[in-house]
Amino acid sequence: MTVSEKSYSTVPELASHRHCVERIHQAWHDFLIKRAQRLEQQQRVGEACEKVAENILEDLFTSVLDWPLSDFNNQLGRADIVLTDHGIKRLVVEVKRPGSLAWSRRALQNALDQALRYASEQKIPRVAISDGVMLYAANIAEGGLLDRVYVCLCDAEPQIDLWWLSVQGIWRDPQPCDRTRLRLLPEEAVERTSTLTEPCDTTVLLHPKYRIPAQCFAYVGDYSQPGSWKLPYLLADGAVDTKRLPKAVQCILSNYRGVKVAGIPEQSIPAVLCRLAEAARRMGHMPPEAFNPAPVYRQLAEAMDQLGVMADSDALKQT
């Protein structure tokens, strides 16, 4: 067991963890009541503005969790919310109107792209997105996102994973094997609060050549610099780009038209391969599921086996 794994295994034994979990359970009922009151205008007129979701998150972070109100910063730079601790910026939260994220794959993609760009501009290593119904948070690392927390804010019982967003939990990194398995578009309805279609967000930064956002690339060096985005493999709506996916794999494992991709640190290669393999498995191309996989996907499976990494098929359901 490594030092980091050992430290993670002792998290439930920390006094700060116990106290925070107690606080979460004690405050959750009142949080749900206040959240419902804030959403009353949505029941009256059919929709609620973004400010309502921001108020719900303020209640969550300062009443359910342990953030002082003075460290809950609105509109810091271009970010909707930034949480700070002793002046250190810990988390960027991009907020959308209630119910607009939990049921729209495109809206989720756009919100994440905005959060990542604002985090990059302010050099903040963690991002979150929320619409007052769901809350997703991740670390920015290895040329992409490392899942941190996904919670439904309308659940009758609280999820103790919220501790990872507390003052004492935010600076700790969950181990990969213990990170929440995310379903940003859940298989079961959580609470469909709006049937309105989210308008196209024109503020999302697109790659000048491919005209797709950062989340469509297997490696991103800097979310505010499209020149650092490498290996496009998804379409703008989050679907797998069947033409570009095998080319992206070839650029890592062999070459594509005689050219190997440059600008990806060696330590990020396993994570990049995992993203590509997840997309390939989603399309049914990866062995052993694929009956007769193409050579490029056999090579991908062999490389991942050699590196001791594997794609989590459950994670495919989040894209």
Image: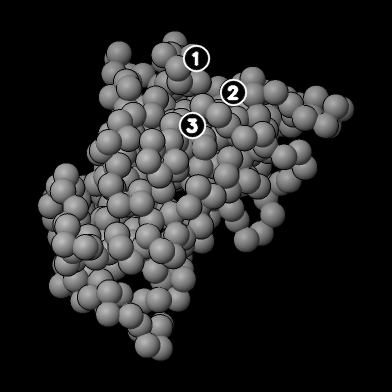
Q: Are marks 2 and 1 in contact (CB under 8 Å)?
A: yes
Q: Position of residue 230 (x, y in %)?
A: 28, 47
- Is 313 displayed left or right of 42 in the figure? left
198, 154: nearer the viewer: 198
Query: Residue at the top extreme?
Result: 70
Separation of marks 2 and 3 at Cα, in angstroms = 20 Å
- Is 121 displayed left or right of 284 in the figure? left
Query: Residue at the bottom extreme?
Result: 291
Q: Residue at x 45, y 59 (%)?
A: 241
> Which of pointers 2 and 3 indicates the residue nearer the eye?
3
Q: Amino acid at mark 2?
A: Glu
For label 2, the residue is 54
Q: Position of residue 305 (x, y in %)?
A: 20, 74
Q: Residue at x 39, y 69 (%)?
A: 280
Q: Residues within 10 Å of mark 3 (few under 14, many from 20)?
A: some
Q: Position of residue 205 (x, y in %)?
A: 44, 31
Of the residues under marks 2 and 3, which one precedes in the sequence? 2
For label 3, the residue is 204
Separation of marks 1 and 3 at Cα, in angstroms = 20 Å
For label 1, the residue is 74
- Is 224 displayed left or right of 64 in the figure? left
77, 93: nearer the viewer: 77
43, 196: nearer the viewer: 196
Vertical placement of residue 42 versus 13, above or below: above
Q: Amino acid at mark 3?
A: Val
Q: Amino acid at mark 1?
A: Asn
Of the residues under marks 1 and 3, which one precedes in the sequence? 1
Q: Residues within 10 Å of mark 2 (few under 14, many from 20)?
A: many
